[in-house]
Image (cartoon, helix red, strand yellow):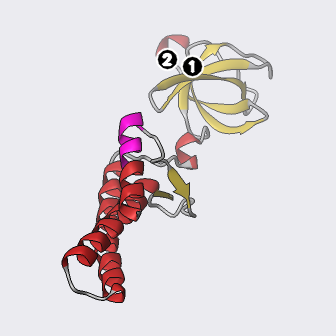
Amino acid sequence: MCFWVGLLLLLSGGFHGHGLAGHLHMGGGDAGGPGFVPILPLMVFVTVWGGTGYVLTRFSGMNRLAVVLIGTVVALLVGCLMYAVLARVMTRYDNSMNELDYEQAGQLGYISIAAADGAVGEMKYVLHGTMRSIGVRAETGQQLVRGDRVIILKVDKGIASVTLFERESGQL
Protein backbone atom coordinates (compact mmCIF):
# COMPACT_ATOMS: atom_id res chain seq x y z
CA MET A 1 0.00 0.00 0.00
CA CYS A 2 2.82 2.45 0.88
CA PHE A 3 4.48 1.77 -2.46
CA TRP A 4 1.33 2.56 -4.45
CA VAL A 5 0.49 5.69 -2.45
CA GLY A 6 4.05 6.98 -2.76
CA LEU A 7 4.15 6.20 -6.48
CA LEU A 8 0.79 7.91 -7.01
CA LEU A 9 2.02 11.02 -5.21
CA LEU A 10 5.29 11.05 -7.19
CA LEU A 11 3.44 10.74 -10.49
CA SER A 12 0.95 13.41 -9.43
CA GLY A 13 3.82 15.80 -8.78
CA GLY A 14 5.40 14.94 -12.13
CA PHE A 15 2.25 15.41 -14.20
CA HIS A 16 1.16 18.66 -12.59
CA GLY A 17 4.58 20.28 -12.41
CA HIS A 18 4.23 20.74 -8.67
CA GLY A 19 1.32 18.60 -7.56
CA LEU A 20 1.83 17.56 -3.99
CA ALA A 21 5.59 18.04 -4.22
CA GLY A 22 5.77 21.32 -2.30
CA HIS A 23 7.79 21.71 0.86
CA LEU A 24 7.36 21.68 4.61
CA HIS A 25 8.76 24.55 6.65
CA MET A 26 10.91 23.08 9.39
CA GLY A 27 13.14 25.72 10.99
CA GLY A 28 16.07 26.88 8.92
CA GLY A 29 15.67 30.64 9.15
CA ASP A 30 18.98 32.25 8.32
CA ALA A 31 21.02 29.23 9.37
CA GLY A 32 22.73 29.21 5.98
CA GLY A 33 21.26 26.07 4.39
CA PRO A 34 17.96 25.10 2.91
CA GLY A 35 15.30 26.15 5.40
CA PHE A 36 12.75 23.53 4.40
CA VAL A 37 12.20 19.83 3.99
CA PRO A 38 11.04 19.08 0.43
CA ILE A 39 8.14 16.68 0.22
CA LEU A 40 9.71 14.90 -2.77
CA PRO A 41 12.32 13.05 -0.65
CA LEU A 42 9.55 12.10 1.79
CA MET A 43 7.48 10.68 -1.07
CA VAL A 44 10.54 8.84 -2.38
CA PHE A 45 11.08 7.44 1.13
CA VAL A 46 7.49 6.14 1.32
CA THR A 47 7.69 4.65 -2.19
CA VAL A 48 11.06 2.94 -1.63
CA TRP A 49 10.01 1.74 1.82
CA GLY A 50 6.81 0.22 0.47
CA GLY A 51 8.53 -1.27 -2.59
CA THR A 52 11.41 -2.74 -0.58
CA GLY A 53 9.00 -4.16 1.96
CA TYR A 54 6.88 -5.73 -0.76
CA VAL A 55 9.84 -7.29 -2.58
CA LEU A 56 11.42 -8.63 0.62
CA THR A 57 8.11 -10.03 1.92
CA ARG A 58 7.20 -11.60 -1.40
CA PHE A 59 10.55 -13.04 -2.52
CA SER A 60 12.48 -13.75 0.68
CA GLY A 61 11.82 -15.82 3.74
CA MET A 62 12.57 -12.99 6.22
CA ASN A 63 10.32 -12.27 9.14
CA ARG A 64 8.33 -9.02 9.22
CA LEU A 65 10.62 -7.22 11.70
CA ALA A 66 13.68 -7.78 9.49
CA VAL A 67 11.72 -6.61 6.43
CA VAL A 68 10.64 -3.41 8.21
CA LEU A 69 14.18 -2.68 9.42
CA ILE A 70 15.84 -3.33 6.06
CA GLY A 71 13.11 -1.39 4.22
CA THR A 72 13.57 1.55 6.60
CA VAL A 73 17.35 1.62 6.19
CA VAL A 74 17.15 1.40 2.38
CA ALA A 75 14.41 4.05 2.22
CA LEU A 76 16.34 6.38 4.54
CA LEU A 77 19.46 6.08 2.39
CA VAL A 78 17.57 6.79 -0.84
CA GLY A 79 15.55 9.62 0.75
CA CYS A 80 18.69 11.25 2.19
CA LEU A 81 20.42 10.91 -1.16
CA MET A 82 17.45 12.57 -2.87
CA TYR A 83 17.47 15.38 -0.28
CA ALA A 84 21.23 15.93 -0.73
CA VAL A 85 20.83 16.16 -4.51
CA LEU A 86 17.86 18.54 -4.23
CA ALA A 87 19.58 20.72 -1.64
CA ARG A 88 22.67 21.00 -3.81
CA VAL A 89 20.72 21.81 -6.96
CA MET A 90 18.32 24.23 -5.27
CA THR A 91 20.98 26.21 -3.39
CA ARG A 92 23.60 26.32 -6.15
CA TYR A 93 22.63 29.79 -7.32
CA ASP A 94 21.07 30.98 -4.09
CA ASN A 95 22.29 34.40 -3.07
CA SER A 96 20.81 35.11 0.31
CA MET A 97 19.91 38.73 0.87
CA ASN A 98 22.18 40.54 3.25
CA GLU A 99 20.94 43.71 4.92
CA LEU A 100 24.34 45.38 4.49
CA ASP A 101 24.06 44.97 0.70
CA TYR A 102 21.20 47.48 0.74
CA GLU A 103 22.76 50.00 3.12
CA GLN A 104 22.47 53.48 1.61
CA ALA A 105 25.12 55.13 3.79
CA GLY A 106 28.38 55.32 1.88
CA GLN A 107 26.79 55.23 -1.57
CA LEU A 108 28.37 57.52 -4.17
CA GLY A 109 26.11 59.35 -6.59
CA TYR A 110 25.48 62.67 -8.28
CA ILE A 111 23.07 65.53 -7.72
CA SER A 112 20.23 65.55 -10.27
CA ILE A 113 18.20 68.38 -8.68
CA ALA A 114 20.19 71.17 -7.03
CA ALA A 115 19.63 72.15 -3.41
CA ALA A 116 20.71 75.44 -1.83
CA ASP A 117 20.45 76.87 1.70
CA GLY A 118 19.20 73.71 3.42
CA ALA A 119 16.57 72.92 0.78
CA VAL A 120 15.94 69.38 -0.36
CA GLY A 121 17.38 68.24 -3.69
CA GLU A 122 17.73 64.87 -5.33
CA MET A 123 20.61 62.55 -6.04
CA LYS A 124 20.89 59.48 -8.23
CA TYR A 125 23.06 56.47 -7.44
CA VAL A 126 23.44 52.87 -8.54
CA LEU A 127 22.73 50.02 -6.12
CA HIS A 128 22.95 46.42 -7.38
CA GLY A 129 22.86 47.55 -11.00
CA THR A 130 19.72 49.64 -10.59
CA MET A 131 19.61 53.42 -10.81
CA ARG A 132 17.92 54.81 -7.71
CA SER A 133 17.12 58.29 -6.49
CA ILE A 134 16.67 59.81 -3.06
CA GLY A 135 15.98 63.23 -1.60
CA VAL A 136 19.10 64.90 -0.19
CA ARG A 137 20.24 67.74 2.03
CA ALA A 138 23.80 68.91 2.41
CA GLU A 139 25.26 67.86 5.76
CA THR A 140 27.16 71.09 6.45
CA GLY A 141 24.91 73.61 4.71
CA GLN A 142 26.87 73.36 1.46
CA GLN A 143 25.23 74.31 -1.81
CA LEU A 144 24.58 71.27 -3.95
CA VAL A 145 24.81 71.99 -7.66
CA ARG A 146 23.51 69.69 -10.38
CA GLY A 147 26.26 67.23 -11.33
CA ASP A 148 28.10 67.37 -7.97
CA ARG A 149 29.36 63.98 -6.84
CA VAL A 150 28.23 63.29 -3.28
CA ILE A 151 28.38 60.53 -0.68
CA ILE A 152 25.44 59.58 1.53
CA LEU A 153 26.36 59.94 5.21
CA LYS A 154 23.05 58.84 6.74
CA VAL A 155 19.39 58.53 5.86
CA ASP A 156 16.70 59.89 8.17
CA LYS A 157 12.99 59.68 7.29
CA GLY A 158 13.75 59.16 3.60
CA ILE A 159 16.04 62.19 3.26
CA ALA A 160 19.76 61.54 2.90
CA SER A 161 22.39 63.75 4.48
CA VAL A 162 25.23 64.04 2.00
CA THR A 163 28.64 65.59 1.70
CA LEU A 164 30.53 66.59 -1.42
CA PHE A 165 32.90 64.00 -2.81
CA GLU A 166 34.24 66.18 -5.56
CA ARG A 167 33.03 68.85 -7.94
CA GLU A 168 33.75 68.88 -11.60
CA SER A 169 36.63 71.26 -12.29
CA GLY A 170 34.45 73.48 -14.54
CA GLN A 171 32.08 74.25 -11.65
CA LEU A 172 34.71 75.41 -9.12
Q: Position of residue 23 (x, y in %)?
A: 50, 52
Does 73 sit left or right of 9 as displayed? left
* Image point (79%, 19%), residue name: 119
Q: Which residue is mark 1?
A: 148
* Image point (54%, 25%), residue name: 125
Does 53 sit left or right of 43 as displayed? left
Place residue 18 in its image quadrant.
top left
CA–CA distance between discs 2 and 1? Answer: 7 Å
Crowding near the residue tagged with mark 1, few <14, some 14–19, many ≥20 C-alpha atoms within 10 Å: many
Q: Which mark is residue 156?
A: none
Residue 166 appears in view: no
Q: Which residue is mark 2?
A: 168
Place residue 120 in its image quadrant.
top right
Residue 109 lies, with reference to residue 15, above or below; the image says: above
Does the magenta stretch mainly form a helix, a strand or a loop? helix
- Please state which amino acid type lies under the numbered disc 2: Glu
